[in-house]
Structures are given as C-alpha cells and as structure tokens.
Image (cartoon, grey):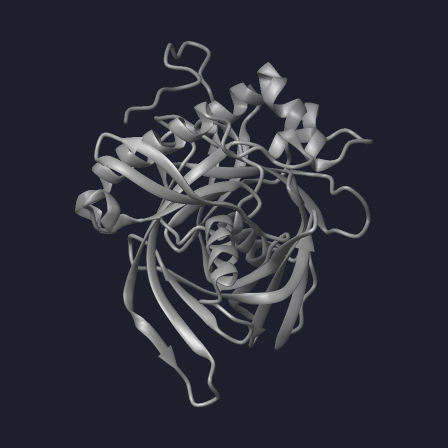
C-alpha cells in the first residue's frame, strides 16, 4: 500500500481525519458526490482504506474523517465523502466546519486577513457552506449552513429495555431519532455514556426494523442514522429585543454505537427543525447546544422554507475547529492485523 497522508483536526472534541486525495475509485470524472458515496460503499479497496484509517491501531471505534473528491460542479470548492468505522455517512456538520477552517488555513481557498470567506462543499446530502471568519489572518470560528431540515414524524412509540419511549424523527442531512434523556432515566454526562450508547443503539435498531424513516425521494438518505438524547441546561433566556436563547445539552449516538464528542452538526440541524416546528425556536432566537464533553455550537434558523410541501428550515451554526497533527500511515505486508480491529 502506498502511504496515506492525512491532516487530523477536531471540532468540539470530535475527530476529523482529512485525506486530501481520495482513493482512485471515487475521484474520477462524471459522478456526483452522492453517486461517489454509492461507489465507495461497493468498492472493496475504498472500504479497506477506510477501515485502515478508522480501525485500531491507526484509529479507534469513534474515529471520523473524509476523503476529498471533486465537487458536483464548479459552484463548490470541494467534495467530500464522510466515513466512520461502520461506513460512509450522508452528512457531517462537524466535518464541514473542520474542512472550512482547513481550506482557509491551508490556502486552498483564499481569505482576507480580516473578514469572512464562504467555503462551499458538496456532500452526499447536498451542497453546504462553511463561512470562515478570520482576524489578523487567523481563523476565529466557522459558521456551517446545512441543507434544508425538517420534521419527519413526531411521537413515534418505541419499546425499549428501559420501558416504552416516544421519539421524534427529523432530517438534518441524515435522519435522527430525538428524545429527552430523562425518559430513559439517564443524564447527558460522561459517566452515563456506556448506557447511553446501549439505549441509542436499541432505539435506532428498533426504528430501522420498522422502516420508520423512509426519505420521501432518495432511498440513499433513508434510515435512522443516530439517536439524540437531550436535556435542558437551564430555562430559555429572553433578551432585551425579545429574542431568546435556548440552552440545551445532547449526546448523539450514531451509526453502530459511535458517540459524537461535538454537539453534532447534522444532529443539531435536526434539533433546530424540531424546535422550530413547535415554535420553541423562532427566527432571531438561537440554541446554545452543548455536547457531552462541554463543547458547544450556537445554532439558529437561517431561513424558513418547504421540503416536499412540508415546513422546513435551513439551519446554521457556529463552532470552532483546530488542527491536531499530520499523519503518514503505512501498512507492513507482514502485519496480520490489517486493516485493523475495533474494540467496543
């Protein structure tokens, strides 16, 4: 195997391993990023490369990253295929925030010493943007604007080992099941993470077995990707101009039991759609969304719209990302533990 060069970042504690040159099977001409994801899922070599980068000893059970690929057209700066230990996801807000910061810091996208720069990224669920704010030539923060997000279903009953629960389902680039963490007798805190993973998996599997999240026009976006367990940090605060700030904490358990250390970008988008649907979050309000490790995104409704005739919102959120290192991964042909292993 040729060495694989990566640049490792984190957004709110959640890793994002950038591979600037994706595998040949997904970088050819003539495909959309959504189509490249389908190719990646079915290509043995691409899956092997993903597994090498995710699995121990080069990664871990919660590793996350992306292969950079050509965008759908000249309207975007780059395309990306997001991956994790279980496969390829359709959306990733924390990854988009990291990509925006990396694109500016690396010089891929020119930016002023002081001001904002829009980095446009094609992802499998659509076209998104990362507005990078710089001051003195240094990236200060990144605002991620996602695809239109909407409520898929409310009050879906699920039988669990902790009793029956009622979940709401929303799309934020991927489908999420959302419920108050108190309904399963837990808290969003590090010492409860093992139990939160277990119930998150249980709810996701039950809903997917019941086909509870079928996307209206793209089967590739169907299925519950993650379970979001939420709690209120403190009551909403009303400001002098009448707008409010909501203060909430969440943990997102996605794919097969992975935990997002950040507040989760696509998950926060789903949360914005749900709160907008009940009127709890209005234009001008914002959501202070905290993660299980204490990092936070500030999210709001950027625009109201409709999707398939249903009310929807375009969510936006601001977060920070930082580079943590560069890597050059190799594989020794004598190594029996290739592409690696995952212990959970």
Q: Residue at x 48, y 67 (%)?
A: 281
Q: Nearer the viewer, residue 287 or 95?
A: 287
Q: Is residue 287 left or right of residue 80?
A: left
Question: In x, y percent, where is residue 282?
Answer: 52, 71
Give the number of callouts. Answer: 0
Q: Residue at x 40, y 54 (%)?
A: 263
Figure check: 179 above or below 256 = below
Question: In x, y percent, where is residue 174?
Answer: 54, 41
Q: Quadrant of the C terminus?
A: top left
Q: Is residue 107 left or right of residue 338?
A: right
Q: Nearer the viewer, residue 263 or 180?
A: 180
Q: Nearer the viewer, residue 183 or 291?
A: 183
Q: Residue at x 70, y 36 (%)?
A: 33
Q: Is residue 68 left or right of residue 267?
A: right
The answer to whether residue 203 is visible is yes
Question: In x, y percent, where is residue 220?
Answer: 63, 30
């Amino acid at each position: 195997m040729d060495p694989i060069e990566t640049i490792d970042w984190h957004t709110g504690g959640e890793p994002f391993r950038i591979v600037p040159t994706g595998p040949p099977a997904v970088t050819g001409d003539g495909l959309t990023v959504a189509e490249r994801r389908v190719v990646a899922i079915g290509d043995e070599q691409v899956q092997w490369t993903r597994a090498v980068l995710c699995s121990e000893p080069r990664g871990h059970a919660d590793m996350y990253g992306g292969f950079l690929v050509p965008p759908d057209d000249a309207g975007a700066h780059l395309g990306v295929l997001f991956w994790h230990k279980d496969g390829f996801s359709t959306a990733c807000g924390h990854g988009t925030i990291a990509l925006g910061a990396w694109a500016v810091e690396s010089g891929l996208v020119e930016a002023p010493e002081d001001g904002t720069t829009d980095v446009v990224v094609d992802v499998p669920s659509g076209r998104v943007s990362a507005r990078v704010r710089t001051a003195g030539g240094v990236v200060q923060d990144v605002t991620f604007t996602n695809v239109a997000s909407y409520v898929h279903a409310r009050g879906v009953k699920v039988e669990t080992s902790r009793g029956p629960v009622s979940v709401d389902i929303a799309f934020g680039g991927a489908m999420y099941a959302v419920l108050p963490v108190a309904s399963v007798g837990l808290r969003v805190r590090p010492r409860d993470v093992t139990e939160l993973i277990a119930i998150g998996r249980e709810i996701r599997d039950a809903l997917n077995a019941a086909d509870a999240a079928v996307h209206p026009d793209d089967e590739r976006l169907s299925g519950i990707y993650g379970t979001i367990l939420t709690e209120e940090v403190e009551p909403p605060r009303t400001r002098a101009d009448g707008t409010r700030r909501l203060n909430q904490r969440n943990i997102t358990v996605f794919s097969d039991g992975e935990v997002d250390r950040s507040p989760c970008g696509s998950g926060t988008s789903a949360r914005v759609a749900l709160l907008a649907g009940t009127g709890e979050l209005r234009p001008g309000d914002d959501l202070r969304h905290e993660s299980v490790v204490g990092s936070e995104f500030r999210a709001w409704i950027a625009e109201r719209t409709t999707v398939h005739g249903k009310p929807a919102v375009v969510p936006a959120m601001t977060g920070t990302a930082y580079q943590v290192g560069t890597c050059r991964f190799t594989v020794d042909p004598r190594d029996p533990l290739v592409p690696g292993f995952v212990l959970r």
